[in-house]
Image (tube, rainbow, N blue to C red):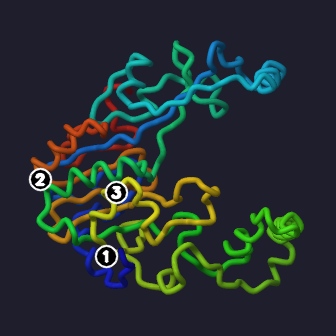
Amino acid sequence: MEWTGDVAAGDWLRGRLDADGPAWGATMHAWVPRGYEAYARIFHPADRDRPVGRPWPPLPYDRHHREWAAFQADAPQIDVERVSWAAVAEAFGTTMHARAQWQGIVGPREVEDEDGPRDAAGWRYSDPPTGELPSDLVSAVTQTLLAHTTTPGDGFVALWEGWGGLVGGLGYGPSRVLFAAAGDASDPSADRHANFLATSLRDRFNDVFRRPSWQPGVLDDEVSRGPRLRLPNRDHVLFHADLTIITDPEWPWRVPWRDRTLEAPGGAASAVSPSLVWPMDRAWVLATDVDSDSTVIAGSAAAIRAVCSDRRLEAQALEEGANLSWGGDEVNG
């Protein structure tokens, strides 16, 4: 997989997208190309957790801080699991369907903006991730889709340029390189250096007189300064790729945008999921907008049937022009 400055390879998408791009009330074609035979929506899984053998303390926090302090001091075991939208809808007595919206299928929060919604069984729910399909599901859906293209070894992957630290640019803060060095526990001066960086970040008065300097990103400076695939309201870095790379569940280790500064020693590779993927023959497109909690596939009827029947995925067929905004869930209100 290699970066390409030949962004004309993605120009064909622009004419198939809504001209105003992602916007309130927009159809899915703000980021998913029109003109395909069929479409499917893959719902990003959520997480839920609950203490073992006891309930969560009550809310709000400020009224029950003693109960929460005692709970934290006890450090009870917490069960955590991935959960499908269908299971969430069942838990809250709502209806799962192709245009369902997360806020429509979960119950109201006990205290808004303070904790996740809880069901009658004591599970607390976290929102599904926006902008990212989990890496294991990226590999799963790509495995399925590569059976529906004549060019499985030749295609393109696009990444939204706005992911924090992905590309370099002019700025005032310390670079990613300095932050990485500051986190080196083997360096006895690491704490002093970290304190220095924190102070420099807070020094707003002196920032007025400072010249901006180049701050490197995860990607090479050549990529950061290079051309972008410009789509409505979203600019992307484009890569020419053998798409079989992302069929491997370990693909985050192999992509150019792997962010080593975020990786714990001995932990998993850190890499955001692709925003767009398509083979050279354009038989299908995988699209994940940064503000969306689902991924949409455009392709042939056969490809969409395969995606929807893949038991590793929670996917449902969509009609062209579907409204996936908050107002698109007319069933759950």
Q: Which amino acid, by three-letter code, is at mark 1? A: His
Which quadrant would the C terminus be assigned to in this image? top left
Q: Which residue is mark 3?
A: 248
Question: x, y (%) of residue 192?
Answer: 89, 67
Task: Count numbered badges in the picture.
Answer: 3
Marks 3 and 2, Cα distance to the nearest angstrom? 23 Å
Marks 1 and 3, Cα distance to the nearest angstrom? 17 Å
Question: x, y (%) of residue 272?
Answer: 47, 59
Q: Nearer the viewer, residue 251 or 43?
A: 251
Question: x, y (%) of residue 24?
Answer: 41, 50
Q: Is residue 27 visible?
A: no
Q: Which residue is mark 1?
A: 240
Q: Which amino acid, by three-letter code, is at mark 3? A: Asp
Which residue appears at 49% of the width and 22% of the height? 107
Q: Is residue 181 above or below residue 77?
A: below
Q: Earlier in the sequence, mark 3 or mark 2?
A: 3
Compared across the picture, whether 130 is left or right of 113 comes to left
Q: Which residue is mark 2?
A: 300
Which residue appears at 28% of the width and 50% of the height? 141
Mark 1 and 3 residues: CB-CB less than 8 Å, in contact? no
Mark in front: 1 vs 2: 1
Q: Earlier in the sequence, mark 1 or mark 2?
A: 1
Mark in front: 1 vs 3: 3
User: Callout 2 environment at 10 Å: few (<14), some (14 to 19), or many (20+)?
Assistant: some
Mark in front: 3 vs 2: 3
Task: Using the rendered view, name the quadrant where residue 109 is placed.
Answer: top right
Task: Using the rendered view, name the quadrant where residue 124 is placed.
Answer: top right
Q: Is residue 240 above or below residue 82?
A: below
| Element on which disc 2 rests | loop
Q: Which amino acid, by three-letter code, is at mark 2? A: Ser
| Element on which disc 3 rests | loop
